[in-house]
Structure formats: structure tokens, C-alpha cells
């Protein structure tokens, strides 16, 4: 019946059918307030320009955190995304077909454990038994594991409160929690306002990585569009390196954060987009640690998570 309907439709409305077959693909790009490169590229039109060469359009979809973005990818609501280390591991372990296609530039010190300025908590060991807020399933969730393990502590030694990034500051200020584990620019905003101080950050913690990923099905169906995304990202990286002041102006205009807060987020960027062997090794260590601690649903070969073919074909690095 469906086949007969299609035949009749093409005979009665040949023009409409032809237009439907040539309708441009809409590429849905997910980003977060911390996605500095995507925000600058969005404002400068680099992504629209590259996608237009392939006859495609761009739809920008904002998210507050990586775990929520992964859920959207699983539900076919986003195609390309900027995301941290733990969300992609959780996704792959949970059977969600996402592929890491490149490394994203970000400040290695982005994550931090914060307490109120006047808090009696002075060391990480003091967190035992305390209420600590973190976005479960995000990069800061694993970061907290990394900090506690050498001390002989685990998440179970804390009262973990699952809170999204924007909600953590108010919870800390009100005293609802004793500490929070947060990323830039949210953490910087609290510190500069004198509302929080850092016990530790991720500057020298292995595996503090951020990535670009695609839905496996989208990448298979539209490899040229994934390559266009990577070319636009490289163009944005180059622009930001050459025009740091202008990039900061762009971010401030398209953000809820002032320039001095955003400036901290742009420090220490590694602009290389290639996922190096050491990055894969660090992600394998994270996966194995999470599996040992029963955080991941099931194990998998870490190589299944990465696909460097798009970056190679795009001719960028």
C-alpha cells in the first residue's frame, strides 16, 4: 500500500517529489556554555559556510551538560557534539553508537572542587561524610574519583548530590551542599565573585580531555558533513589563535558570562585536533577504572569509541 501511494504521489506531484528528494540535510550541532570553539565558530558562521558547500543547513542545539547531550544523541535529536571524557565512555558502554572524531581544545584546569570561602573544609580528605554536588556521568564525576582514590576514599564515602552545573553555585551558597565539583566558566564565576575557593583542579590530572563526537548512523550516512564540521572547527581554531581579543568579544556577546570570566576558560588550550595514542591510552585507563568500580554497564574495546578517518579525510589536524 505504501509503495502504491509513493508511485501515485510521484505521478501526480512530480515537482514536489523532486524537491523532497533534494531537500537540504539539516545538521544538528550540540554545544554547551563551555564549548568556546563551537560558540565562536557559530558566531562567525564558519560551520554554516562549510555545510553550505555540501548543500546542508545547520541547527544549533544548546545543552547544559554532556550526559544530557548523549541522551539526545541516543534519541536521534543531535548529530554532532562537543563533549567530555566520561559521557562518551558511558554512552559506548550503554550501547549508544557514538564515535569520537577529534579532540576539542579546552583549558586543562577547567574542573575544580569548590567550597565556600569561609568553609572549615581545607583538604580533600575533609570531604569525607560531606554533601558534595556533581553532575553524575560528566567529566567532573570521574575527576572526583581521581582525587579521592589516592586518599583511600571513594564516592561512597561522600553524600553525592547529582546537580547540573548552573544549579551547583546556588546550592553551595545556600549551604545545601558542602562542596561542588564544577567546570569553567561556572567555577571561575564563583571564584571571582568571592563565593568559592578551589581545593583542587584538573590542571595536572591525566585524562582531562574533551572531544568532538558524532552519532554513528549520521557519520555513516553523511561522512562529507562530518568532514565539513571538522574543517569548520579547524577554521575556528585558527581564527581564535590569531584573534584572541576578537574571540573573547564574540564569546562575551553570545554568553551569559563577562569577559574576565571567559578569559580564564581560554587559557592553556591544546589546539591539536588529532586524538593521540596517549589520549586513547588515558581513556582506556578511565574506562578500566570505571568498570572496576562498577560505574560502567559493560566493558568494551576502547578502539571502538574512536574513528580518526573523518579527520584524515578532512585533511586537518
Image: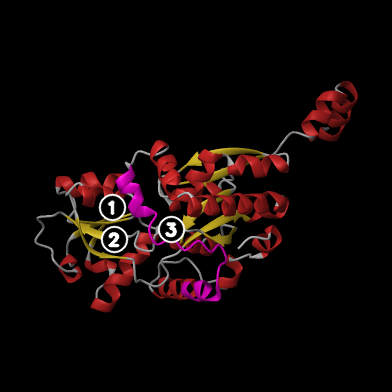
Q: Is residue 163 visible?
A: no
| Tag count | 3
- Foreground pick, 49 / 15: 49
N-terminal of the two: label 1 or label 3? 3
Is residue 177 found left or right of 142 in the rendered image? Answer: left
Q: Residues within 10 Å of mark 2 (few under 14, many from 20)?
A: many
Magenta run includes residue 301: no
Query: What SS does tag 2 mark?
Result: strand
- Point 17% across, 49% down: residue: 195
Residues at discs 1 and 3 in contact (Cβ within 8 Å): no
- Single out the residue that lies furthest toward the top: 12
Magenta run includes residue 262: yes
N-terminal of the two: label 3 or label 2? 3
Q: Mark number for residue 112?
A: 2
- Looking at the image, residue 100 lies above or below residue 299: above
- Looking at the image, residue 284 lies above or below residue 55: below
What range is drawn magenta here? 259-282
- Foreground pick, 138 / 95: 138
Residue that carries the numbered disc 3 in the rendered image = 106
- What is the quadrant of residue 133 in the picture? bottom left
- Looking at the image, residue 130 lies above or below residue 239: below
Residues at discs 2 and 1 in contact (Cβ within 8 Å): yes
Residue that carries the numbered disc 1 in the rendered image = 187
What is the quadrant of the C terminus in the image?
A: bottom right
Residue 125 location (% of width, % of height): 18, 71
- Looking at the image, residue 109 lies above or below residue 46: below
Is residue 22 found left or right of 248 in the rendered image? Answer: right
Query: What SS does tag 3 mark?
Result: loop
How far is disc 2 from disc 1 in space, using C-alphas?
7 Å
Of circles 1 and 3, which is in front? 3
N-terminal of the two: label 2 or label 1? 2
Residue 206 location (% of width, % of height): 40, 73
Amino acid at each position: 500500500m505504501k509503495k502504491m501511494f509513493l508511485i501515485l504521489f510521484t505521478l501526480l506531484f512530480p515537482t514536489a517529489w523532486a524537491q523532497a528528494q533534494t531537500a537540504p540535510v539539516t545538521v544538528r550541532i550540540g554545544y554547551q556554555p563551555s564549548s568556546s570553539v563551537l560558540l565562536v565558530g557559530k558566531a562567525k558562521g564558519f560551520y554554516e559556510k562549510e555545510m553550505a558547500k555540501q548543500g546542508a543547513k545547520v541547527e544549533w542545539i544548546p545543552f547544559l551538560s554532556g550526559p544530557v547531550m548523549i541522551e539526545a544523541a541516543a534519541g536521534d535529536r543531535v548529530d554532532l557534539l562537543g563533549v567530555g571524557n566520561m559521557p562518551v565512555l558511558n554512552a559506548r558502554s550503554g550501547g549508544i553508537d557514538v564515535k569520537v572524531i577529534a579532540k576539542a581544545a579546552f583549558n586543562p584546569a577547567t574542573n575544580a572542587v569548590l567550597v565556600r570561602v569561609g568553609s572549615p573544609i581545607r583538604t580533600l580528605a575533609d570531604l569525607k561524610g560531606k554533601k558534595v554536588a556533581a553532575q553524575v556521568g560528566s567529566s567532573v564525576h570521574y575527576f572526583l574519583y581521581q582525587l579521592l582514590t589516592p586518599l583511600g576514599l571513594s564516592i561512597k564515602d561522600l553524600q553525592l548530590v547529582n546537580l547540573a552545573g548552573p544549579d551547583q553555585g546556588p546550592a553551595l551558597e545556600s549551604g545545601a551542599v558542602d562542596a561542588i565539583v564544577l567546570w569553567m566558566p561556572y567555577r571561575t564565576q564563583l571564584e571571582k565573585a568571592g563565593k568559592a575557593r578551589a581545593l583542587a583542579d584538573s590542571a595536572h590530572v591525566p585524562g582531562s580531555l574533551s572531544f568532538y563526537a558524532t552519532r554513528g548512523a549520521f557519520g555513516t550516512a553523511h561522512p562529507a558533513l562530518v568532514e565539513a564540521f571538522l574543517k569548520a572547527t579547524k577554521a575556528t581554531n585558527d581564527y581564535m589563535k590569531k584573534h584572541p581579543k576578537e574571540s573573547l568579544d564574540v564569546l562575551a556577546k553570545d554568553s551569559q558570562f563577562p569577559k574576565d570570566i571567559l578569559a580564564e576558560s581560554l587559557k592553556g588550550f591544546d589546539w591539536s585536533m588529532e586524538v593521540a595514542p596517549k589520549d586513547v591510552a588515558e581513556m582506556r585507563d578511565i574506562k578500566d577504572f570505571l568498570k572496576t568500580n562498577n560505574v560502567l554497564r559493560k566493558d568494551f574495546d576502547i578502539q571502538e569509541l574512536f574513528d580518526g578517518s573523518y579527520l584524515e579525510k578532512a585533511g586537518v589536524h
